[in-house]
Amino acid sequence: MNNVHNRIKKVVIAGGGTAGWMTAAGLTKLLGKNLEVVLVESDDIGTVGVGEATIPTLHIFHRLLNIKESEVMAATNATFKLGIQFENWKALGEDYIHSFGFLGKDCWACGFQHFWVKGRQKGIATEIGDYCVEHLGARQGRFAVLPNQDLNHAYHMDASLYAKFLRRISEQHGIRRMEGKIREVQQHMDGTISALLLESGELVEGDLFIDCTGFRALLIEQTLNTGFEDWSHWLPCDSAYAVQTKTTHEPVAYTRAIARQAGWQWKIPLQSRVGNGLVFCSKFITEAEAKQTLVDNLEGEMMFEPRLIKFKTGTRRQHWNKNCVAIGLSSGFLEPLESTSIHLIQRSIIRLLQMFPSNGINSADVAEFNRQTKIEMDNIRDFIILHYKATERTDTKFWRYCKDMEIPDTLAHRMELFKQSGKVYKFAQELFGESSWLQVLIGQGLMPEQYHPIVDLMPDSELNDFLMSIKQNVKRTVSQFPTHHEFIQHYCKSSLV
């Protein structure tokens, strides 16, 4: 590989948007003094920009960049997010919340769910969300960021405003932005990338290239032919319509994911508007029918005509190939059901910073980067498939397909383990923890056949007191919070409102 033993002195980021400017901010802020960073983007090329919901891991990125929460929220028209409400997924007319909190209290031998399962059997336990502050806060519309009681929260934000916010940070730390379209990607004799030739005739040379060109994957795929692992047989949705609407009521502190005839609809409340979309499978519904389904289920006035986005779920066979790292949609796509898009961008950036090839790219770092990325992608893939597979719906061809489809062995094992014993687990480098798996497994209608025998050492009266104490503490904590809307007005009100 050319330049293998040469120091990486110049990084070229191809593409802007959320992925490009998150990468730029991370590199310039944390490595910029020893590195030249150039970002190439064209104002004529739009970004997908539908991913407006995040998960709590974004706090890690913001702490690294020393970003103040209230400032980024005000700048991005953001609201708080305590979880996702899934409507019609288990069955028509039924819903549940996957919150970001931890459920109850575990013991050394088993998780809280084992005590809860016995409590349900004895008629002394209520819904599992009653034992989680974030879950109850979401349902009651209450929120606060307190010194000694920091909720596990994320954001609903305007992705384009977030990119602009990060661009300002990048510019403060020396990024060089070049406007223009890429005409050609040039390579060395060994196949590594040497430069980007712009339509203006300018040549942008570099040592390491970051592909943030979105679904086009101009560098990682069109140039390096890295290969793609297709997951559409497990995640069959291949299209989405997206539109923004005017606000009709105060924003809730959760994303709504509403299962429809052949896919699902999202509703993401910002301070001054609502992000909406319909993810669907074109094999089971026409584009015209999908668009009409979305329009018929909007609550506010549309701010523009719905725009169509086509995609294929899956992942690159390598996310780091030669001297190119794919970040964002160029690296693969998992539909936005669990708001993991920005998280995956962030993880790739942090992983790259941890393994940054200052003294030259070596095969061991590349292999480890790809190994860790694959583990995380596979975990998220399985978690999203779970929502489709574990359904009782048989009312349409789409839902019958999902209910009957073959699934990865890794997911089949998790589901069977939970069904037989109530056990869930999390491996290192996996995103979703035990509380997340529990809430979705139970929410989709899966219940364990038995619980851990240690629970029977606790008399029924003691079990009742244990469950009641947790529930009362959760209720008391949430009752002290202001409403979500009140807190936003005080903490991070946007100038757009």
Image (spheres, helix red, strand yellow):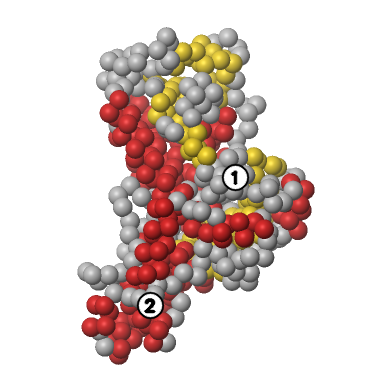
- Give the number of marks: 2
Position of 22 compared to 200: left or right?
Answer: left
Spot occupied by residue 118 in the image (x, y as percentages of width and height): 36, 81
- Give residue 493's quadrant in the image: bottom right
Spot occupied by residue 20 in the image (x, y as percentages of width and height): 49, 32
Crowd tier of the residue under label 1, counting other residues whose Cα lies within 10 Å: few below 14, some 14–19, many 20 or above: many
- In the image, residue 370 above or below residue 482: above
Relative to the observer, which residue lies in front, 64 or 358?
A: 358
Q: According to the image, label 2 marks what residue?
A: 117
What distance separates the C-alpha of mark 1 from that of mark 2? 38 Å
Going 73% across and 56% down the picture, which residue do you hit?
293
Position of 238 compared to 206: left or right?
Answer: right
Residue 148 in view (yes/no): yes
Crowd tier of the residue under label 2, counting other residues whose Cα lies within 10 Å: few below 14, some 14–19, many 20 or above: many
- In the image, residue 273 above or below residue 307: below
What amino acid type is highlighted by mark number 2? Answer: Val
For mark 2, give the secondary structure. helix
Going 65% across and 50% down the picture, which residue do you hit?
280
What amino acid type is highlighted by mark number 1? Answer: Val
- In the image, residue 118 above or below residue 12: below
Position of 254 compared to 243: left or right?
Answer: left
Residue lying farthest bottom?
461
Residue 151 in view (yes/no): no
Spot occupied by residue 385 in the image (x, y as percentages of width and height): 50, 54
For mark 1, give the secondary structure. loop
- In the image, residue 350 above or below residue 175: below
Which disc, if any, is residue 50?
1
Spot occupied by residue 214 in the image (x, y as percentages of width and height): 55, 33
Q: The N terminus lies in which quarter of the figure?
A: top left
Relative to the observer, which residue lies in front, 386 or 246?
A: 386
